[in-house]
Image (cartoon, rainbow, N blue to C red):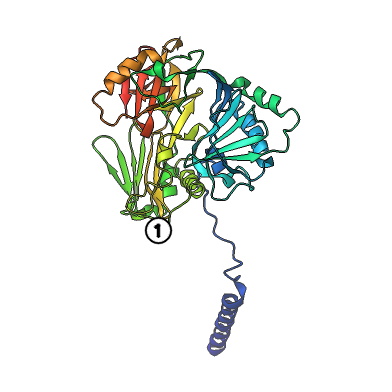
Amino acid sequence: MRERVKTGLLLLLVGISIILTGRLLFGQPALETALPPAYERLTFGELRPPTEQLVPRLRLGAEDAWWVLEPWDEGQSTAWALLLELIHAGKPPEGAAPPHKMTGTAAHAFFAMPVKARLWLSASLPAELRVAEVAWFAQEPLKIWFKDHQGSWLTSELSLLPDGWEEQFMNAFAGGVRHRLWSAAEWEPLVVDGEDKILIPEDLPYLAPFSIRSEMLDTEKLLRSIFINQAMVRRIEERDGAVIYTDGQRGLRLFPSGQIGYTSPKSEPGQEAMELGQALRRAAQYLQFMGGWPVHLWVDPFSAAQNLPGSHLQGQVETISLVSVQEGMRLLAAEPAVKLLFSDRGVIDYKRQIVLLDSPLGAERALIDPRQAVQSVAEYLKAETTVGRLIQVYPAYYVGHGTAQPAWVFLFKHGQTVFVQGHTGQILASN
């Protein structure tokens, strides 16, 4: 009897062994057809394509009266779409003399930085053309003008204007801000070159100071997005209240003020240079995993224009800076809202300090005429030895000491900036 039981158990074990072996050999799907494991989607918002990052500043007018549409202004997308309609209908451009003798109504589109035209303009444009400015003149309505990154001009011929195009284009600027052009003499002793047009709003803006608050990010989600293996992450508290998370290869530092700092030295240097469109796509991908790209953030047209692409530090390294725009005004500080240093190997250094306007601190008041502050700016810069020419003056908020102060921004060539308190004319800061 015992022998029979042993024989039965042995046969059962052999049967089970055969079944399991069969399942192992034939019962599992091939690797190529197996479903991938389901990971949590650790991203912040949607990707922003380069065509939405590099939206031009538009200007329409004649002589000393101009309407300006910033990328974030109402009507900008309509006006830009109408101008693109002409660009797409134009013939391949040819070299031309600068359009200095044009008179009457003119329209200009200024880009934050030159980029290959085929990124968003027209497949009929040369692949190597990097456009810095597009212009249209009512004096010669069947021509579109392009200024490349080296300052040379090209023109594209049109067969005809679409029906009602000019009226639609003019109407798109109805929501723009009317500006006045002031001659170089109005800004002395500061130096303005003849090619630069210093425009300031005809009706001085009414602004109030604001209290501010830091953006709120999901810290746990950010950690899981950056550090795949959480078991390897150490947490270090510093005396100033900041907290560092590191796995030995990269570090994330969270400050009490809401600032975020990330470093990954192993990503430097890069192996391959990136053209602008590629670099912007890569930057958008990085930001999607490191806090997102909110709708109020825009590529800084001044600091980024000199850095992306081409600031090659210890290899192929790219930099992008982003500025926050709220209540129709830029929020500026000693450091940009977001600054990203990266290469084709990944993020090298990332700083993020985004603040939001909270509550007004008093009533709105008209800003002073910025020309009243010219002498103060000149005196403030007297000790500087590298002051460039003045290229733009515009209203903004200057963020510092827990508030956002109305300000006039004096921008000089090569990015030097002076911030003037918009109600008093007092110098706030410079960088």
- 366 shown above or below 74: above
Mark 1 surroundings within 10 Å by alpha-carbon count, few (fewer than 14), some (14 through 19), many (20 or more): few
- Measured as percent of width and height from the top left, residue 185 is found at 40, 17
Q: Which residue is mark 1?
A: 271
In this view, the residue in front, 16 or 243, is 243
Q: Quadrant of residue 7?
A: bottom right
State the residue lying farthest toward the right: 163
- Measured as percent of width and height from the top left, residue 123 is found at 63, 48
Q: Considering the numbered disc 1 on the image, is that residue within a helix, a strand or a loop?
A: loop
In this view, the residue in front, 208 or 389, is 389
- Measured as percent of width and height from the top left, residue 39 is found at 52, 53
In this view, the residue in front, 162 or 355, is 162
- 287 shown above or below 379: below
Q: Residue at x 40, y 48 (%)?
A: 342
Q: Quadrant of residue 36?
A: bottom right
User: Looking at the rendering, in which quadrant would you find the N terminus?
Assistant: bottom right
Q: Would residue 365 be seen by someone viewing this image from the given angle? A: yes
User: Looking at the rendering, in which quadrant would you find the C terminus?
Assistant: top left
In this view, the residue in front, 214 or 149, is 149
Amino acid tagged 1? Gln
Please indicate whether residue 174 sits to the left or right of residue 132 in the image: right
Q: Would residue 48 be seen by someone viewing this image from the given angle? A: no
